Image: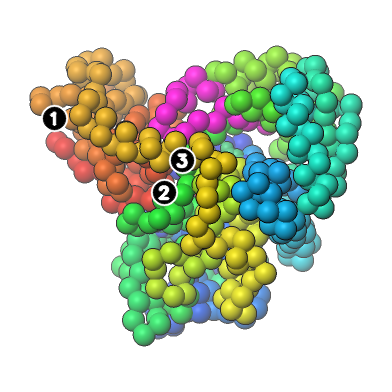
Amino acid sequence: METNQNTRDGRNQSLWQKNMSKTDAGNAFDPAITYDVLIVGAGITGLTTALLLRKKGLKCIVADAHNPGYGTTGGTSAHINTFADTTFAEVEKAFDEDAAKQFAKSIAESVQLIQELIGTHGIDCDFEWKNGYLYAQTDQETRQLDDIFASSLRAGVEVRVTDQVPITVEYQKALIFDRQAQFHPLKYISGLQAAFAGLGGVVLENTPIHEIQTDNGIHTAISAGKQIQASKVVYATHIPPGGVNVLHFRNAPYRSYVIAVTLTNDNAYPDGLVYDMQEPYHYFRTHMIDGQKYLVAGGHDHKTGHGSPEQAFEDLISFTKKCYPVKEVYTQWSAQYYIPADGLPYIGQLPGASDGIYTATGFNGNGMMLGTAAASVISDLILNGRSEYEALYDPSRIKPIAGFTEVVKEGADVVARFIGDRLDFGKIDELSEIPAGSGAVVDYDGQKLAIYKDPRGNIQALDPVCTHAKCIVHWNNSEKSWDCPCHGSRFGTDGTVLTGPARENLAHRE
Ligand SMILES: Cc1cc2nc3c(=O)[nH]c(=O)nc-3n(C[C@H](O)[C@H](O)[C@H](O)COP(=O)(O)OP(=O)(O)OC[C@H]3O[C@@H](n4cnc5c(N)ncnc54)[C@H](O)[C@@H]3O)c2cc1C
């Protein structure tokens, strides 16, 4: 079923979804064609890859399980930076100084590519250059800031010290990264899609691809009554779907929270991208939509299925009120990202899959640049058989991950949750305790059930065992979804897959 709305993998509407109608899907699918490339997923990664390859004359088809922008690209905060969540100092430590320089170069080229695509294809997406401000408030944060400053310079990234951060809170020391940028992510990918369709590209909606069969170098996907054949496949699905892949253990899924608020004073909106260094961190920027300015604030991330989404929103709103004169919260939403085990994304041939099947994941909170970088790397691999970044981002690399203990801990947590939850879950043992419009995993008549009670009191009972790696899902009351704490699969209240890697819906238990 097609709607004229951009839907997203959560109940809350992001600022970008408001007043945004869908892009025309464009050209018709031809089952007689063996396409050069099937791109699975129509977020920033998939649509950029599709456009780059189509511009080089390849016959490309994009298939999305839902609609373009349904994944994190529809719920991002859309900062474009020359630095990343994994600092250049961390890359030097986990890899070496050359790797940090290469990482910086790849990011800088992706910023350039975004700008070029906007220019060449006349994409109207509110793109603006901005200064990026990073400020430290404690001695420890200042030491980290000094480390970021020195390692950014070593990596070739322009940065300088400033005392002009557009925020009222006190800070010890701050940096400016020049020529950062921001845009409207759904307008941007809508422009990519229109350019792709204008060149004859095909975009299929409501077409989940869970399995590919390969015969004589031709890959076949069957979905939604269609058989799609292609010489190459790119999983631009944010995390590869399907059975348990090594990449599911090298990426930890996180939820992150964003609000768009109006301020009482028009002059209080910051002109720039502002980041603190707290744990959990916060960021602020301004975006104008239909003549109205909004302060976009975000942070309070936690691992998916852990922590309380409602508390995260409450904390984010109250923190924002301390920093800016908030008049009204216009909208709030959350979305998912993946922290890679050694700090760098995984881009290239999908481990364990047939030749010619590629993937891109582990973008941390930097997928505007790294999704774009992934499109360049994968296009180069397909067109030329090589990319200058293929070793750096190789999904099969084996790196010591000592510096990234969080993800190592996450791995242990996967096992603990699996065993612990299955032996001892269900603190709520009566259906009547679940408020209308909410859900819980309960002990009910000797079984474990994921119960959702809709606003009218009707009950939807599901098997709470995630169909990916058998962990127990948790209720996310903010996005009204069942979230798996192990690898980040998410399901709707009726059990349908919202976010992979799971490909099977939660089973109904009624
Ligand atoms: C709150 C938040 C704020 C962020 N802010 C920033 C920021 O300011 N700057 C930045 O650079 N990055 C940011 N990020 C990260 C960035 O948004 C993501 O890395 C990026 O959007 C990922 O894009 P993608 O195209 O790879 O994946 P997605 O946008 O998730 O797209 C994947 C698509 O694949 C489809 N799909 C999935 N499985 C299948 C299947 N089996 N078959 C067919 N289709 C499938 C989905 O429907 C979806 O449309 C943020 C992330 C979060 C969570």
Which label sits in the foreground, 1 or 3? 3
Q: Answer above or below: position of 374 versus 472.
A: below
Where residue 159 appears, as percent x and y from the top left, is 85, 42
| Residue 59 seen in the figure | yes
Question: Label 3, label 2: how many angstroms apart (C-alpha)?
Answer: 9 Å
Residue 412 found in image quarter: top left
Mark 2 C-beta to ligand 1 under 8 Å: no
Question: Label 1, label 2: how many angstroms apart (C-alpha)?
Answer: 29 Å
Q: What span is colored magenta in the figure?
A: 291-313
Disc number placed over residue 408 in the picture, else none: 3
Disc number placed over residue 447 in the picture, else none: 1
Of the residues under marks 3 and 2, which one precedes in the sequence?
2
Residue at the spot of label 2? 249
Amino acid at dot 3: Val
Front position in the image: 112 or 26 = 112
Question: Label 1, label 3: how many angstroms apart (C-alpha)?
Answer: 32 Å
Is label 1 in a helix, a strand or a loop? strand
Where residue 103 appears, as percent x and y from the top left, is 69, 55
The residue lying at 39 percent from left, 68 percent from top is 353
